Structures are given as structure tokens and as C-alpha cells.
Image (tube, rainbow, N blue to C red):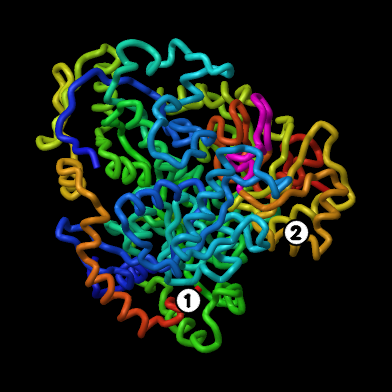
């Protein structure tokens, strides 16, 4: 990458964090913030201990337990293995002087919810975490990506990571979003269009009036699912919406440095004539509310559409893949999406567990009841999201409608805790992955927006929010 | 880290696209605080029924594929979560090489941290290798020469030089980076002046 000429947002963050080149030709990239959770860190801390290496910069590291934690009865984790993992994180962070939000701390929550919430996530930063949905933080114009446990250990020991530059892709979405269409529909549509390997090797920058018109919550939903498009990271240029969101949060730059930070942040957006390796332009008027029908996030269709027919596939491999998905999902080709009957509703996750998501759900289910055959669960993304919702009376609306109101965590997005689907159960989920077995062995996941999930909870079938009154 | 140089043996065919890390190692096995012992749970939901019995016709449950050190799989192998438990479970099972048309970035990276060689081939080459694997033809993989041989097929593959060296020598990445401590410190000193808000103690 040359230092001259117009640069993308990614190029700017990259060159600003380049420590140097190693003799093997790889680049050492400085990491500003490292987020740590209980599932992918124990082996990294163990590695440090074996090699007798200290944590290079404990104050740049923030830890929280989220993947494993129960969403009811928090005082006692019943699963002995989960309990050991959470205790191990508490012990490791204490030993190395790392800030840890424990389960009783109101600031506890899903790592990708609390970073932005606390103001830890800021434009122009490099942020890593042993979790693929670290891409969420790209909504602030931070270069943020998921890493494996060996790399977690590398960052703990050196505050750097070994990388080669990614390629630049820009996806521009233009126009006002149609009624009933929101950020989740937009990102599902994009993944359907480019496929789950469409972004491999790239950082995707989202641009255009539809994207820049979104709130920070909406932008986070978009960047969150960049990994489902195979991208290393997602990015959105920071603007006034970003700065307003950050100002005043606990870890945000204080008055002493605010103007200086703002000046730097304002220099970050991609230069007008910057070059992209790949460009996609989308007119938002072509987007409907979207739902997944299969077992890959690229298996998307309009809520007004039909379950696809394997015989219409263009290749033999694709045909086999559709057949396998339909068998797992228990669906027949040609079925109307809105005829699919549900058993469970899950609202939460790092994709859609923020206050804005909860407000939308509450506005839809207010003074209504969920269908008698469904079980519906809301898991706020953090203790503070939960508190805010309770202050606004959202919990009362949801409980009156028949939703279970839980404590914060990753919960049924991946079902590491007791919140899981049973074999054959069908779930409308606001999470990010519909893989086989993801929400519980044999469980069937339909990804969708909080609005659709809320409407579907009331009718008991997958429902189009535009038909819902 | 384990070194990788060359490898010979039967390859297990797994002609499924988008094999994700949840399929490779489901969530219930992520509760460990160790790197070892995950091989028995590799591809758990495809390998075992609801009662925990082996599903007899799954490829890794059949002889001779239950001894495979090589896996030939469909496009976009290893997509999904960043869990390094995926390569740990492959390694613990005995698999040291995965061949596909493409790999998800994080999984690809994680392989090299664990002495596993992921090889990218073209769709046509994959079709040929899938047939060779199904017919139990012996594979021969040579990293220095960057070749995969199976029966009449001989395929050259690409790999970045630094990744190749790291596998060949089994290098400790953290050890190498700590050799650049002076550069890291100099970077930090410079940024403390230029971007002081990033260095406030949390």
C-alpha cells in the first residue's frame, strides 16, 4: 500500500497502526483495545503462564463473561464447566490487573454491546477480540476483527498482531429505506447477494445515504454481520451521529482531549477518489423485509417469498446444498414463508440486543399477546440495556405480552448456556447464524429483524411487519 | 508449535459446502479451558446420534477414513465463529491437512497457529481430489515443493512464503514478535504524544 494518493478509511487506520515489518515480510499492527471473554481466553492465559510472559498493556484490555452465562438465577452457575470458565476469567484478569465486569456488575453484557456502550469503542482504533462478531465495532469507524486464541495470547503478550493488509470493498446503499425495512434486512439482503464467502480477504466499507441515515445501533447491526459475508471486518465512516453517541460515555475522551480526538476522527473518512478492489451499489428500494429459510446466512428470501426449489439451482453442488438445508429445516420447496409456523422467538444477541431493538419490539407487541403455541424470550444485550428498558417500562409491556424477560448475555444466539432449542423446534431469531445445531441440536433457526420477530411472536407464523396492524 | 513438512495417507472426502465451525466443533465443547481432548467431539452432530452412538455411515466413522490425516471438503470451509477449538479438534483427531476451494479467513489463520496445512485448490481440482479420496487413493503432500499428488493427479498449490516457513520450522510467533519490542515501545511513545486519549488508564 502506498503512502501517497487517496486513501480509504481502512488504509488510514492501517497505516496509523503499523509498528513495522517483521523479517518474514509480515506487518505488525498495533492494537488499541483488546476485549476478552471467558470462552476463547483461558488457553491464551495458560500459554502466557507456561512461557512466563506478562500482559504487555493490561489497561488496554477489558474483560467480561457473556457466552456461557445463565440468563436466570445468576448467583449460581449450575453447569460446572461453565462455572469453571467464568471463574477462570475472573482469576486471570485479577492476576494480570485487567478490568473485569463481573456477573453482578450492571455493566456486564455481551462484549460487543458493552464496548460501544461504555465508550471504549472509538473511531480510528484497532480493536480485537476472540470472537468473530468483533466486526460490530466497525460501525464507529474502528478497524475491529475477530481472532483465534493463539492470537489472543499474541495480543496479550505484545499488544500487536501479525497481519497482511486486507483488500478494500465498498458496498454503497442509496435511497430512503422502504417502510418496514431496516438495518437487519439490509445486511441479510447484502449477504444473500454476495454470499457467505463474498467478502473473504476484504474489509467491507458500507457507504451511501441509506447507511449514513442509520442510527449507531442500526450501523452496528450492519457491521456485526460482515463476518457472515466472509469479510475480515466491516467499516462505516464516523460522522456527527458517531461523535454524538460517544460523547459523555465513561471511557470516551474527556473534555481535556475531546477536541483533539474529534479532529483526528474527522480526518478518517475515505478520500473521495480512493480506490476500492471491489464495489457494489445497491438501490434500497429493491429491498424487502428479509428472512432466512436455510442453514447458511446467505439462504435469504423476502418475507413475501417462497422456500426455494432445489431443482432451480444452477449447479449440482448448490442443488445438494439446498436439499440438505431443506431436509434439516423440515421445509418443502414452494412453501410461502409466511405459512411457516414457529415454536420459539428469540430477541437479543450482539446483532439485535440493544435498547433501540427492544423499543421497536415493545412498540409492536404493546397491548397484544403472543400466540398461545409460541414461547418468546427477550435477552437484553447488557445490564445497562436492561436497566434502561425497565426505566422506560418496556419490560412491563413485553411481560404483559407474554415474553420472558431475562438477564444479559449471548444466550440462545449460540446456546452455550441452558437457553437452547430442542430438536425440531423452529425459532424466529434476531441473532446472526442459522447454522445446523447453532441454537441447539436439531433446532431450526430463521434469522430476521426484531420487527419481524415481534410480529411473528404475535401471529405464531413468520409475519411481514407491513401487514401487521 | 508442531512442524509440517510432508504427509502421506488416505484422505477423507466431505463433499459439503460451507462447513462452519459449529459443525466442526459444537458449542457444548467450548467450555474447556484446555487445548487438547477435542478430537473425540470433532464433527459431533454428524458423527454421533442423539444417544451418543456412532453414526456408522459418516465418513470419519468408517475404516480406513477414521485414520485419515487429510480432509477434502467443499467450498468455504471453516466459516463462522473464530473458535480455535475447530483446528484444535481437527488436530486432536489426527487431521493435519484440509483441502478445499476456499477457507474463511479466521479459520485459515488459526490452522497455521496449530501446525495444520490448509490447501486451496480450484473447483475442478477439488472434484478430482474428492473422487480420489472417495476411491481411497493415497495422497502425498509436500509442503517444500507445494504439491498434492493423488494417483495420476499432481497439483501445485499456492501458499504465502511466511506461512510456509512458519509451518516448516514450527516457529513461536510470539517469540518472534517480542524480538521487535523496541519498535513496539517506540510506537507507543510516539502515539502517547500524538493521541493521548488512547493512553489514559482505563
Magenta part, dominant SS:
loop
Q: Is the residue A411 above or below the residue A325 in the image?
A: below
Residue B58: quarter of image: top left
Mark 1 lies on a secondary structure that is loop
**Left or right side of A8 for B9:** left
The range drawn in magenta is A410-427
The reply to the same-chain question for discs 2 and 1 is: no
What residue do we see at 38% from left, 62% from top? A55
Q: Mark 2 against mark 1, which lies toward the viewer? A: 1
Residue A302 coordinates in the image, percent (x, y): 62, 41
Viewer-proximal residue among A264 and A20 = A20
Question: Which disc, if any, is residue A359?
Answer: 2
Q: Is the residue A93 above or below the residue A120 in the image?
A: above
Residue A64 coordinates in the image, percent (x, y): 55, 57
What residue do we see at 50% from left, 63% from top? A62
Residue highlighted by disc 1: B201
Does the magenta-highlighted stretch encompass residue A426? Answer: yes
What residue do we see at 61% from left, 32% from top? A440
Q: What's the chain of the residue with tag 2?
A: A
Amino acid at each position: 500500500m502506498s503512502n501517497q494518493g487517496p486513501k480509504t478509511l481502512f488504509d488510514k487506520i492501517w497505516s496509523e497502526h503499523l509498528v513495522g515489518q517483521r523479517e518474514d515480510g509480515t506487518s505488525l499492527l498495533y492494537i488499541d483495545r483488546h476485549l476478552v471473554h471467558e470462552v476463547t481466553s483461558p488457553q491464551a492465559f495458560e500459554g502466557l503462564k507456561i512461557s512466563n510472559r506478562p500482559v504487555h498493556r493490561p489497561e488496554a484490555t477489558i474483560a467480561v463473561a457473556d457466552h456461557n452465562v445463565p440468563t436466570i438465577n445468576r448467583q449460581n452457575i449450575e453447569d460446572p464447566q461453565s462455572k469453571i470458565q467464568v471463574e477462570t476469567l475472573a482469576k486471570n484478569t485479577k492476576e494480570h490487573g485487567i478490568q473485569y465486569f463481573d456477573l453482578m456488575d450492571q455493566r456486564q453484557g455481551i462484549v460487543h454491546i458493552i464496548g460501544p456502550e461504555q465508550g471504549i469503542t472509538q473511531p480510528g482504533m484497532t480493536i480485537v477480540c476472540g470472537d468473530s462478531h468483533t466486526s460490530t465495532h466497525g460501525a464507529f469507524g474502528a478497524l475491529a476483527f475477530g481472532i483465534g486464541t493463539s492470537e489472543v495470547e499474541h495480543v496479550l503478550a505484545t499488544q500487536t498482531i501479525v497481519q497482511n493488509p486486507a483488500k478494500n470493498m465498498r458496498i454503497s446503499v442509496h435511497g430512503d429505506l422502504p417502510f418496514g425495512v431496516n438495518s437487519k434486512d439490509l445486511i441479510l439482503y447484502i449477504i444473500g447477494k454476495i454470499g457467505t464467502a463474498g467478502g473473504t480477504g476484504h474489509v467491507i466499507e458500507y457507504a451511501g445515504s441509506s447507511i449514513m441515515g442509520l442510527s449507531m445501533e442500526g450501523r452496528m447491526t450492519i457491521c456485526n454481520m460482515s463476518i457472515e459475508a466472509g469479510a475480515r471486518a466491516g467499516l462505516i465512516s464516523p460522522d456527527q451521529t458517531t461523535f454524538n453517541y460517544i460523547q459523555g460515555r465513561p471511557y470516551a475522551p474527556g473534555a481535556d482531549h475531546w477536541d483533539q480526538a474529534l479532529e483526528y476522527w474527522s480526518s478518517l473518512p475515505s478520500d473521495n477518489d480512493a480506490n476500492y478492489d471491489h464495489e457494489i451499489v445497491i438501490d434500497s428500494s429493491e429491498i424487502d423485509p428479509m428472512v432466512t429459510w436455510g442453514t447458511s446466512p446467505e439462504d435469504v428470501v423476502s418475507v413475501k417469498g417462497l422456500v426455494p426449489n432445489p431443482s432451480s439451482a444452477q449447479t449440482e453442488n448448490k442443488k445438494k446444498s439446498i436439499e440438505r438445508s431443506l431436509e434439516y429445516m423440515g421445509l418443502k420447496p414452494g412453501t410461502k414463508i409466511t405459512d411457516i409456523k414457529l415454536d420459539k422467538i428469540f430477541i437479543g444477541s450482539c446483532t439485535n440486543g440493544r435498547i433501540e431493538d427492544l423499543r421497536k419490539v415493545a412498540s409492536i407487541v404493546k397491548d397484544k399477546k403472543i400466540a398461545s403455541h409460541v414461547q418468546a424470550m427477550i435477552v437484553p444485550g447488557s445490564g445497562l440495556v436492561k436497566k434502561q428498558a425497565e426505566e422506560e417500562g418496556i419490560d412491563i409491556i413485553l411481560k404483559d405480552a407474554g415474553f420472558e424477560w431475562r438477564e444479559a448475555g449471548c444466550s440462545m444466539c449460540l446456546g452455550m448456556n441452558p437457553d437452547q432449542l430442542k430438536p425440531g423446534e423452529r425459532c424466529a431469531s434476531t441473532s446472526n447464524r442459522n447454522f445446523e445445531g447453532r441454537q441447539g441440536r436439531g433446532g431450526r433457526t430463521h434469522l430476521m429483524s426484531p420487527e419481524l420477530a415481534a410480529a411473528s411472536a404475535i401471529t405464531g407464523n413468520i409475519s411481514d411487519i407491513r401487514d401487521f396492524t | 508449535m508442531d512442524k509440517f513438512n510432508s504427509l502421506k495417507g488416505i484422505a477423507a472426502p466431505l463433499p459439503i459446502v460451507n462447513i462452519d465451525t459449529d459443525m466442526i466443533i459444537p458449542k457444548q465443547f467450548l467450555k474447556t479451558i484446555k487445548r487438547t481432548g477435542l478430537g473425540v467431539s470433532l464433527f459431533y452432530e454428524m458423527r454421533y446420534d442423539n444417544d451418543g452412538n456412532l453414526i456408522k455411515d459418516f465418513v470419519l466413522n468408517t475404516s480406513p477414513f477414521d485414520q485419515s490425516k487429510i480432509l477434502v471438503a467443499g467450498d468455504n470451509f471453516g466459516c463462522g465463529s473464530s473458535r480455535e477449538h475447530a483446528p484444535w479438534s481437527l488436530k486432536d483427531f489426527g487431521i493435519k491437512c484440509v483441502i478445499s476451494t476456499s477457507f474463511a479467513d479466521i479459520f485459515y489463520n488459526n490452522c497455521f497457529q496449530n501446525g495444520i496445512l490448509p490447501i486451496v485448490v480450484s473447483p475442478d481440482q477439488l472434484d478430482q481430489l474428492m473422487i480420489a479420496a472417495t476411491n481411497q487413493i493415497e495422497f502425498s503432500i509436500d509442503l517444500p515443493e507445494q504439491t498434492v499428488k493423488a494417483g495420476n493427479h499432481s497439483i501445485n498449490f499456492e501458499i504465502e512464503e511466511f506461512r510456509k516457513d512458519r509451518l516448516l520450522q514450527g516457529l513461536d510467533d510470539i517469540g518472534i514478535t517480542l524480538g521487535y519490542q523496541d519498535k513496539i515501545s517506540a510506537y507507543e511513545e510516539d502515539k502517547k504524544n500524538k493521541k493521548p486519549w488512547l493512553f489514559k488508564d482505563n
